[in-house]
Amino acid sequence: MRFCLDIKLTQHELDIVRPADVKATQAHDEGGVLCNSVAILSTEAALLTASAKRVLYCMCREWEAKHRHFVDELGGGHNVETLRYYL
């Protein structure tokens, strides 16, 4: 994504944002983690599809809050705006 957006980060800045990159690129053998999570949660937890969606929505909001906190903590003399744009 950063290549398409012409975002240039130093190696040190890439190291700083690595925790967010790792989360964003985690995938299962069968594809993306979230692609079929509704069906998997519904089956494994014996939930209706609508219930599984509500649970996953809350979980994704928690991940979003954690990600925002991570981004808010950036600093240390780096090009913070570029890092925030990338993340």
Image (cartoon, rainbow, N blue to C red):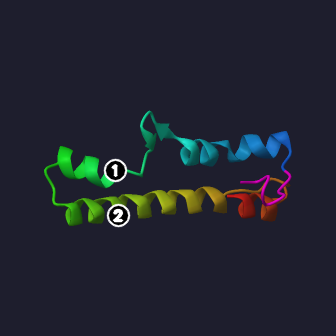
The stretch of residues the image draws in magenta is 1-8
Amino acid type, residue under disc 1 in the picture: Ser
* Residue 4 lies in the magenta-colored region: yes
Image location (x, y in percent) of residue 44 = 19, 44
Residue at (42%, 51%) from the top-left corner?
34
Q: Which of the image's four quarters has the C terminus?
A: bottom right
Residue at (51%, 57%) from the top-left corner?
66
Residue at (59%, 41%) from the top-left corner?
22
Q: How many marks?
A: 2
Quarter assignment of residue 62: bottom left
Q: Residue furthest left?
A: 46
Quarter assignment of residue 48: bottom left
Left or right of 51 on screen, residue 66: right
* Residue 70 lies in the magenta-colored region: no
Left or right of 33 on screen, residue 68: right
**Image vertical order of residue 30 relative to residue 74, above or below:** above
Q: Residue furthest top?
A: 29
Quick one: label 2, few (<14), some, or many (20+) residues within 10 Å?
Answer: few
Residue at disc 1, secondary structure: helix
Residue at (41%, 52%) from the top-left corner?
35
Q: Nearer the viewer, mark 2 or mark 1?
A: 1
Q: Residue under circle 2?
A: 58
Front residue (pair 47, 62): 47
Amino acid type, residue under disc 2 in the picture: Cys
Quarter assignment of residue 52: bottom left
Quick one: label 1, few (<14), some, or many (20+) residues within 10 Å?
Answer: some
Label located before the other in sequence (2 or 1): 1
Label 2 to label 1: alpha-carbon separation: 13 Å
Front residue (pair 3, 60): 3
Q: Residue under circle 1?
A: 37
Q: Which of the image's four quarters has the N terminus?
A: bottom right
